[in-house]
Image (tube, rainbow, N blue to C red):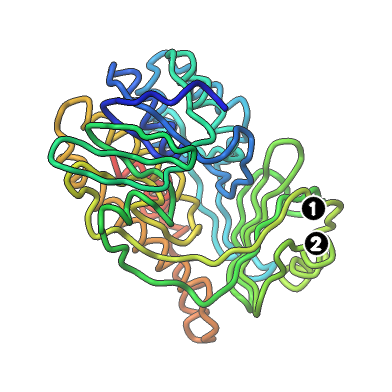
Amino acid sequence: MSSPLPTRTDVAVVGAGPTGLALAVTLAEAGVDFVLLDRQAEGANTSRAAVVHARTLEVLDELDPTGALSAELVSRGIPVSRFRVRDGARPVAAFSFDGLRRRTAHPYALMVPQYETEAVLLARLRALGKDVHRPYEVTGVVQDTDGVTLATSTGETLRATRAVGADGMHSVVREAAGIPFSGGSYDASFVLADVAMDWAPGRGEVSMSFGPAGPTVVAPLPGGRYRIVSSVAGPAPAEPDLAFVQALLDRLAPGQAAVREVVWSSRFRIHHRVADRYRAGRLLLAGDAAHVHSPAGGQGMNTGIQDGYALGRALADGDPAAYEGARRPVALRVVALTDRMTRASTTRNPALRLARNTGLRLLSRVPLLCNRVAAELAELNYR
């Protein structure tokens, strides 16, 4: 157990993932009193996100103008400036982040495990004299005209002026607020694996390959590992093993991969949902509690961190109503983009696949359009 739970605060933040940590750091920098709770013990994190985009690194620079915060995260990851698309093993198109040098100090995608991003944000929070209260699971949230009361699994309660749900897709705060979570799910099943392997395309790019069952993304991670995210036909095993991952890559790109070890793996299904509102009275939503979408483009964690920063600034300015107007349109845009990417990559119609590949080839050969794609992926258009 971390430090004892206070009885009162200004802002109660439920969930200490990247979104909650970014919000907490922003509030701490602004001198706003808050309590950050999380139901997990420290270190109990098997995470899926593995990319930090340029706009998120800019947010870290705004939180720490010395640049030390973003520099620390960059030192833990692998900057990659090229995103390549393949149809099986055959190259289709390549998009470079190099053309963004005039728009950002971070013209690359930073490949780094989510736990490293959380560790850097947590270290910054502790340097500011604050911490996460663990493990406190919020079991009930009730608001009234004067504030919000949060009940925890330990039997303790916390009284706050406002509460923020940064507690993921199955948000207790969103449920208490009565906010609908509109959208749906994709039929495909996905697997995720961190592996040690020999990979012919090498570590200088992130690649997305179209296959019979849908897309497969292979990206380099620190320590000589690779992150694999792949759509599969039929039910996926709960924990894909080496033989399963090797067979998956062999079907996609024969002779390109030799998997030596599966470090960690899981399966999941993906949804596309956006909360109808980001605020109900004194309750607010951020990150996956407010929006979930396909992992295509790797924008989920990034959008959440940017939510946390924007909400922290709005609360510090005493204008929480400004937050929804600034961030919900971004979520709708991200969900629409990732939905188009997912549907295009999973189509089995030969004519549509030909049109998709031809369009991507033409797009990648026009520098202006290539830069626009890179800027959208980097979330630089969401400032």
Task: Name the residue rendered at 26%, 58% in the picture.
Answer: 179
Which of the labelled discs sits on residue 241, or is there none? 2
- How busy is the neighbourhood of tag 2: few (under 14 within 10 Å), some, or many (20 plus)? some
Give the quarter of the figure containing the N terminus: top right
What residue is at 27 percent from the left and 36 percent from the top? Answer: 311
Taking the view exactly as shown, the residue that stands out farthest to the front is: 155
Q: Name the residue under label 1.
A: 262
Cα distance between the residues tagged 2 and 1: 7 Å
Structural crowding at the residue carrying mark 1, measured as other residues with C-alpha within 10 Å and reported as few (<14), some (14–19) or many (≥20) = many
Asked if disc 2 and disc 1 are in contact, CB closer than 8 Å, the reply is: yes
Q: What numbered label is drawn on residue 315?
A: none
Q: Position of residue 246 (x, y in %)?
A: 81, 64
Query: Vertical placement of 168 versus 213: above or below?
Result: above
Q: Does 48 sit above or below residue 123?
A: below
**Image spot of residue 342 (x, y percent):** 47, 68
Residue 28 position within the rendered picture, expressed as x and y whole percent measured from the top left: 35, 20
Mark 2 element type = loop
* Residue in front for this viewpoint, 96 or 334: 334
The amino acid beneath tag 2 is: Asp
The foreground one among 95 and 313 is 313
